[in-house]
Amino acid sequence: MAVPIRGIEKGPRLLPASVSGWIALGLFGLSLLLLLARLALTPAFGLPFNYLLVFIAMAASGLLAVIAVALRHERSIGVFVTLLFGLFAGAFLLAEALGGSGTNPSVTLGEGDNGKTVNMSAGTSVLLQLPGNPSTGYDWEVTIGNPSVLEQSGMPKFTPSSSALGAGGTYNFWFQPKTAGKTDLTLVYRRSWETDIAPLKTYKITIAVQ
């Protein structure tokens, strides 16, 4: 009579087998909830969630997944998925740290430059600072007339004016001229779901690269 062998699993596990694996998967789930909050709750209720929080949480989950795989020999599908997304998020944060936000701008522009033509040379980094408040649901949308002349460097950063919940502040945009030529740079301040309503603010300048 054959005796069945127990304790041998067929195929990979779907869920983690270690505590560190569960923590990594839980943090990955939190990052997805933050993404849902940014996509759904911010437009509906004006909550001040930022995509940067999503990437930070996802990168942290990836780090925990690496620890689970290396130290706990975790081999579940859930942990490997978390690890892959975490590595992507970590690479994105590293690129952001080394990209536009880390450069020292040669030209700084603001509200007072609206409507002007700005002359600069290729290779000059540009910082554009505009006021705003993401908790209201409004956001700046960027349009570059000729992307071969000017490109945006990294994602914009919002700096609140105070620590109060829902406080306004300053949006920072970085741009990099590429080749000689002219292009319009237009930013509109609007709610993304209000497609039939004129923007609350419009900022437009002409960039002339020598």
Image (cartoon, rainbow, N blue to C red):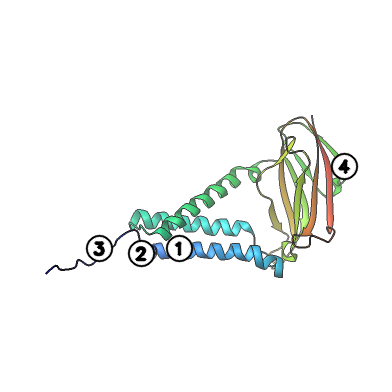
Of the image marks 2 and 3, the number of the one nearer the N terminus: 3
Mark 3 Cα-neighbour bin, 10 Å: few <14, some 14–19, many ≥20 = few
Report which residue position mark 2 lands on.
18
User: Could you tell me how far apart the alpha carbons at marks 3 and 4 are, in whole angstroms?
Assistant: 72 Å
Question: Does the CB distance between marks 1 and 3 fall below 8 Å?
Answer: no
Question: Does the CB distance between marks 2 and 3 fall below 8 Å?
Answer: no
Report which residue position mark 4 lands on.
116
Of the image marks 4 and 1, the number of the one nearer the N terminus: 1
Left or right position of 145 against 25: right
Q: Nearer the viewer, mark 3 or mark 4?
A: 3
Q: Residue at x 75, y 52 (%)?
A: 141
Q: Residue at x 82, y 61 (%)?
A: 196
Assign a secondary structure to mark 2. loop
Left or right position of 157 against 26: right
Left or right position of 117 against 71: right
Q: Quadrant of the N terminus?
A: bottom left
Of the image marks 4 and 2, the number of the one nearer the N terminus: 2
